[in-house]
């Protein structure tokens, strides 16, 4: 499982890392993303969900973790992509 803690990072660089690693993940692999519970953290998670292709992941969970450093935890699983076969017509 790939894990990102975005609570104290440079966001544009982190978003780039997330997209690159997601592209390299195998189907079925999971990604955990932690962000702060403040409005900035919520908008970061929205950005993550916007930049990743919606057809290529399942949102497993979204929860708030209460700890010394509270966070919103997002869990994604990369989908298995099946290619559509071309239909052939015989005349």
Image: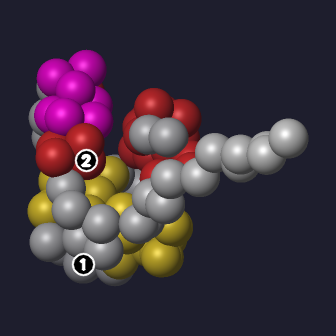
In this rendering, position of residue 4 left or right of residue 42: left
Q: Is residue 32 above or below residue 11?
A: below
Where residue 12 sits: x, y (%)? 25, 20
In this rendering, position of residue 88 left or right of residue 83: right
Q: Say which residue label 2 marks.
A: 22
Q: Select label 2 or label 1 by which is in front.
A: 2
Magenta stretch? Answer: 12-20
Secondary structure, magenta segment, majority class: helix
Q: Secondary structure at mark 2?
A: helix
Where residue 67 sits: x, y (%)? 24, 78
Answer few, some or many: residues within 10 Å of disc 2's Cα (few below 14, many 20 plus, some between 14 and 19).
many
**Residue 13 counted in the magenta span:** yes
**Residue 31 counted in the magenta span:** no
Taking the image as drawn, is residue 43 in sight?
no
Q: Tag 1 or tag 2, which sits nearer the N-term? A: 2
* Image quarter of the C terminus: top right
Q: Is residue 13 above or below residue 55?
A: above
Give me the residue at 47% from left, 76% from top: 60
Give me the residue at 28% from left, 58% from top: 33
Q: Spatial distance from mark 2 to mark 1, Cα to Cα? A: 27 Å
Residue 29 falls in image quadrant? bottom left
Q: Nearer the viewer, residue 23 or 74?
A: 23
Where residue 41 sits: x, y (%)? 41, 44
Taking the image as drawn, is residue 50 in sight?
yes
Give me the residue at 44% from left, 40% from top: 52
Q: Nearer the viewer, residue 76 or 70?
A: 76
The label number, if any, that marks residue 67 in the structure image: 1
Give me the residue at 50% from left, 67% from top: 58
């Amino acid at each position: 499982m790939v894990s990102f803690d975005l609570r104290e990072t440079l966001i544009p660089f982190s978003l780039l890392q997330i997209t690159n690693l997601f592209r390299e993940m195998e189907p079925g692999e999971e990604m955990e993303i932690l962000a702060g519970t403040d409005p900035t953290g919520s908008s970061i998670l929205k950005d993550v969900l916007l930049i990743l292709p919606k057809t290529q992941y399942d949102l497993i969970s979204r929860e708030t973790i209460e700890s010394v450093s509270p966070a919103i935890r997002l869990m994604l699983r990369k989908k298995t992509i099946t290619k559509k076969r071309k239909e052939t017509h015989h005349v």
